[in-house]
Amino acid sequence: MVASLKVCTDELLAQAVCDKIDEYLKLIEPKRVIIAFDGVPPMAKIKQQRERRYKSWMMPGKPGWNTLQITPGTSFMTYLDKVLHKHFAKYAAKYDYFKLSTSVEPGEGEHKIFEYIRAHPIVHKRSKTLVYGLDSDLIVLALNHLKYGDIRLLREAPAFMLEDRDLHVLDIPKLAEGIGELIGPTKLPDYILMTLFLGNDFMPHFPALNLRTTGFDTLLKTYQQCMTTERLFDGEIKWDQMARFVQALSLQEPSIMTKEYLARNRMRVDASTEEKKMTNLPMLKREIEHHICPIRVGWEKRYYDTLFNSPIKDICKNYIDMLQWNMQYYTTGCMDWSIYYRYMYPPLLVDLAQHLPVQTIHTVDKTILTPSELLHYVLPPVYHHYIPGGHARESEPPILVWAYCRYIWESHVDF
């Protein structure tokens, strides 16, 4: 069973979407409007969508309207697209500019918006831009597009802040100013590049660089020590400087891995209910971590033998290619729709350092999956009835791997 919504029919949900957008438009009173929904994304994102949808199937949830239907190509999304076009048809004459991009158009919604910003720099230089959305990528995208104008984000407080669900405006120029005080006012792209080592929708974090613990501090201190005047990114990744940076990080990897391992050994875990046992499973069953065990000689070999089935050079090359793809995706858009990270875990920093520097080679592949191909790939077979003309069928669930994870929803799916 998967997560559910209180809204229990397609009609009510589609109307609720329109009403919510109307509410924001009335509140903000913009002059130019772009409303963008997720279409078929690049393969790097599709891989993550597939993992999330399989984990939703494999984990207990509440009965109700199935959120897996919010995937381009389903009958619901086709219906929603029609409702949106009908509802917002009257809006074209109300604003100086109005564009609606539904799930029919390829690309992630937030990237469609920033593609428009890049294409109209003069307009955005003369005005303030407010982007509403909850995707964490929005912060990175907004930071990386400040040269195009004054950009701010509008979003609700996180769900865990139960006492405060009001809307908040995130001042991106002020955030950039704070980052500049840490690493230098002209080195914002370096900050964005560094955050990739902490993981995102397209790449896993390094076990030695965990955002929950000391990962960010380690990155920042290492950068401040070895990148005083140099840059990691200047339109392209500067691989010679990246090699120095990763080498400096790799020297700390064994001690951090040991500290993290011992800290996880000491951590108290709540298993008082079945639900809490499931949530905390990665902390209750740590056989893989205990086998790798960084306090015993040869742990690096055990890391690869246990979590991979490929040569280290292939893993490192794939990771390096994805670093480059990410920065290009956040800066100028998607040139390669087929590339993706092929493994559940990253290489060790010590091995990544040995495969740097490299020569920048841009790959171009505009092959985009059809909505039907996307659905067949990301939906578990038991939900193939959501594919137009498809039929549900039973299948064995894949294996979850949760080494170095804190909660079950962070686990990796071993297809």
Image (tube, rainbow, N blue to C red):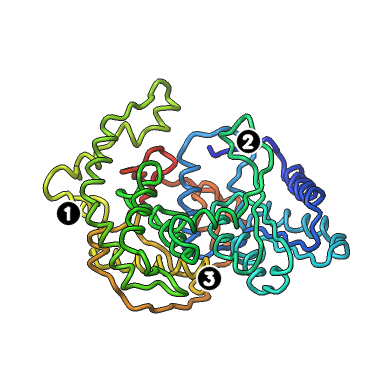
Q: Is residue 28 visible?
A: yes
> What residue appears at the point 78 percent right and 51 percent down from the top-left corner?
28
Q: Earlier in the sequence, mark 1 or mark 3?
A: 1
| Viewer-proximal residue among 38 and 349 | 349
Q: Nearer the viewer, residue 256 or 178?
A: 178
> SS at mark 1?
helix
Q: Earlier in the sequence, mark 3 or mark 2?
A: 2
Distance from Cα at disc 1 to Cα at disc 3: 35 Å
Q: Please state which of the two labelled residues, at mark 2 or mark 1, is closer to the viewer.
A: 1
Q: Amino acid at mark 3?
A: Cys
Depth check: 131 or 345 in front?
131
Up/down of 406 relative to 203, above or below: above
> The residue tagged with tag 2: helix, strand or loop?
loop
Mark number for residue 45? none
Residue 411 horizontal side relative to residue 160, left or right: left
Asked if marks 1 and 3 touch (Cβ < 8 Å), the reply is no
- Left or right for 114, reference 365: right
Sort mark 1 into few (<14), some (14-19) or many (20+) by Cα contacts within 10 Å.
Answer: few
Q: Tell me where residue 120 sits by quadrant.
A: bottom right
Per the rendering, the mark at residue 301 is: 1
Name the residue beneath numbered marker 2.
64
